[in-house]
Image: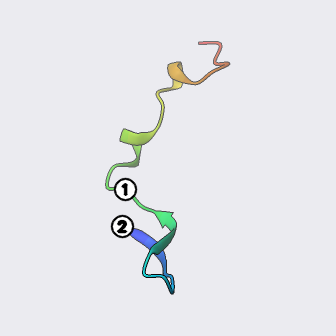
Amino acid sequence: VLEGQLRADGTFEAATLLTKCGSRYEAAPEDIEGNAG
């Protein structure tokens, strides 16, 4: 789901992107730089 506005030139400018399963798009904790684990 996108939230935003249709611009005058016909393009859509998204302000928010909602995904069905957000955890699929997040890095696993062990993949985050600086994690001591």
Image-quadrant location for residue 12? bottom left
The label on residue 19 is 1
Label 2: element kind: loop
Residue at 42 percent of width and 81 percent of height: 10
Label 1: element kind: loop
Amino acid type at circle 1 is Thr
Q: Residues within 10 Å of mark 1 (few under 14, many from 20)?
A: few
Picture coordinates of residue 6, whole percent (x, y): 46, 82
Type of colouring: rainbow
Decide which of tag 2 and tag 1 comes sooner along the chain: 2
Picture coordinates of residue 36, whole percent (x, y): 65, 13
- The residue at the far bottom in this view is 8
Residue at 51 percent of width and 65 percent of height: 16
Q: Is residue 20 above or below residue 11?
A: above
Q: Are marks 2 and 1 in contact (CB under 8 Å)?
A: no
Residue to which mark 2 is pinned: 1
Decide if residue 37 is on the left or right side of residue 6: right
Residue at 48 percent of width and 82 percent of height: 9
Q: Quadrant of the N terminus?
A: bottom left
